[in-house]
Image (cartoon, coloured by chain):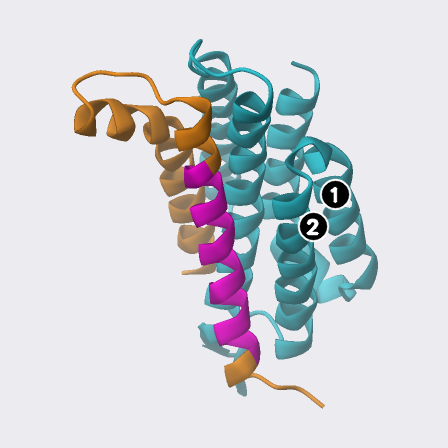
Chain colours: A cyan, B orange
Amino acid sequence: MKSFIVRLTVSLGLITTLGGCAVRSAPVSLSGAGLAAWQANEVVIALDTVMNSAIALNELQICDPQCHSVLSEQNARIVVQSVRSADIVIKQFPAGYVMLATTALDQIELYLDTTGKAKLQPYLTAARVILTTLGTR
Amino acid sequence: MYAQLIIQAFALFAPIVADVINKHRAANNGQMPTNEEMIAAFNAHVDESIKKADEWLKKHPGN
């Protein structure tokens, strides 16, 4: 468990650093709507990663001793529907990505049950870190 | 196994984010993407994510 926490911390550091690098390396050729699309694109990828993780954890079975999904279908549905809704609105208003993605992440955290929240917390934290980095640019 | 899945997801995510421009430059003789190209790439990613969500929801219709 200790090893896992160390590796998770390193991974979070890596994602934060590289996320920041990606933002700093936004092409100088982009401006206005293009730059907003670049930033919104990173947020969409971050939300997509949260959704992919929820789907993968829902497919993953553990037996202790009864077999069940690591993440319940109800929790996975909350994530999938929230990300889908955010995607649709971000596509219409890329410049509003901070508010829209924050709302989606807040909604996910609000509606997940305690077990689901515990399983998905690292992904949600990583998505918020990326959002914060982009939002303060 | 669960811990491994989290670590893999994080390890995969950062390169995906950082790689968007590199891929574009490689495919366009080192040229930086224009606003129009970036907007098109963004729209494609969003559509892909929505499609994935729709497919999952179709397989898991719920109550």
- Which residue is painted at 50% across and 25% down in the image? A19
**Residue highlighted by disc 1:** A100
User: Is A30 located above or below residue A90 in the figure?
Assistant: above
| Dot 2: element | helix
- Which residue is painted at 69% across and 50% down in the image? A89
Amino acid type, residue under disc 1 in the picture = Leu
Q: Nearer the viewer, residue A115 or A23?
A: A23
Q: Quadrant of residue A118?
A: bottom right
Task: Answer with mark 2 or mark 1, whichever residue precedes in sequence.
Answer: 2
Question: Image check: B22 left or right of A119?
Answer: left
* Numbered range of the magenta stretch: B40-57
- Residue A38 image position (x, y, % from top left): 51, 28
User: Is A86 located above or below residue A11 in the figure?
Assistant: below
Q: Quadrant of the C terminus of chain B?
A: bottom right
**Residue highlighted by disc 2:** A89
Does residue B43 show up magenta in the picture? yes
Question: Image check: A97 left or right of B45?
Answer: right
Chain for disc number 2? A
Chain for disc number 1? A
| Dot 1: element | helix
Q: Nearer the viewer, residue B18 or A109?
A: B18
